Amino acid sequence: MYIFVADSKQTKKLLKMKYFKFPLALVLALVVLSCGNKKKQEVEQAVKAFDIEDYIKTAESIEPNLSKVDQVFSILDMVNAEYYESLTNDPYSAHSYKTSYPVAAANLGIYITDIVYHQFGGQEEKMYLTFQAAQELANYVGVESAFSSWTIDNIEGADMMKRDTLTMLFNTLLKDSEKYNSEKEMVFVHTAFLTGSFIEKVFISGNLLKQKMQESELTQEQEGDIKKLLVIYLNQLDPATGTLYKAFEQQKEALSGLTVLSTFEKLEALSVHLREIKPDMIAAPVAELASNKDLITSFELITDLRNVLVSATQ
């Protein structure tokens, strides 16, 4: 991935507005492969070159990491993903999440992931609106400085790895914030942020996987993309789900009355099972995958968790 700043006068003006510390802007490197001039040669070479194992190896190379939000961009590009605005959260809902720090932090995590997805889809207006929503929540929970540093580093072309350490900056700033009375409270807010980011990542990738599996007359390359996305999706679920479940389990008192813990418990157990049967799923026909009950259940549990987060008001 590459970072760029659009050089148009209009974009430069936008960066000078209230919310300008805007990172964004990643650019896809497009590789064009030439297989010869004759159509027959192209087909023969494509068939010869196709190897599903290469697709799987590429997918396995993506290391799941709760702290890597921008990893989503690489994944979307890798599987030739489509853009659906309906998979993102409404940026105009940001004000309704300022009822508690955990709720705000969880939806900040969701918005951060959405920013990357809007950017991938080339939806500049939605991207700016979502950035503003994220900055509003960052200010509320006390991580505005960290959020601004993240965006400035991107605009100035700083080390790419800094994009993937927002959660580390988030945790550092919480320690300096006067908004929290104890370290336990700060840890819970940080966990909420990680949860929002994680849920949105698997919500988007899961829905894209469902959409791709519903297509008919798939080419070998399209089937390869589906298998890649399946591997990435399963790797995202486990061990991340278990990590978050354990974190929430240690903070049960803060979750009284919420369904988050029980839903995470179900998803964690299912994620482990899916990881165990991953080799069989990779080898299965796409039509069989589309009707896999365990996979469908995982989609449903993730949707339930996301609904809890985006509809939370207290």
Image (cartoon, rainbow, N blue to C red):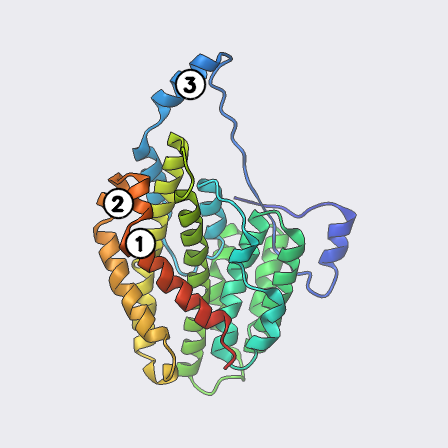
Lower sequence index among marks 3 and 1: 3
Looking at the image, which residue is at 33% across and 59% down?
298
Counting from the top left corner in percent of width and height, residue 92 is at: 63, 68
Q: Earlier in the sequence, mark 1 or mark 2?
A: 2
Report the amino acid beneath label 1: Leu
Q: Is residue 144 visible?
A: no
Q: Which of the numbered marks, if any, corresponds to residue 281?
A: 2
Residue 11 falls left or right of residue 171: right
Assess disc 1: are there few (<14), some (14-19) or many (≥20) residues with their C-alpha within 10 Å of its C-alpha. Answer: some
The residue lying furthest to the bottom in this view is: 181
Q: Which residue is mark 1?
A: 295
The numbered disc on residue 43 is: 3
Percent coordinates x, y for residue 27 in the rendering: 58, 43
**Residue 30 found in image quarter:** top right
Kindly report the distance in space between the C-alpha atoms of the residues bearing marks 3 and 1: 34 Å
Q: Nearer the viewer, residue 170 or 41?
A: 41
Mark pair 2, 3: CA separation: 28 Å
Q: Is residue 309 above or below residue 127?
A: below
Q: Are marks 1 and 2 in contact (CB under 8 Å)?
A: yes
Q: Amino acid at mark 3?
A: Val
43 to 139, vertically: above or below: above
Q: Which quadrant of the view contains residue 237?
A: bottom left
Q: Nearer the viewer, residue 139 or 254?
A: 254
Residue 140 at x, y percent in the picture: 58, 77
Residue type pointed to by label 2 = Met
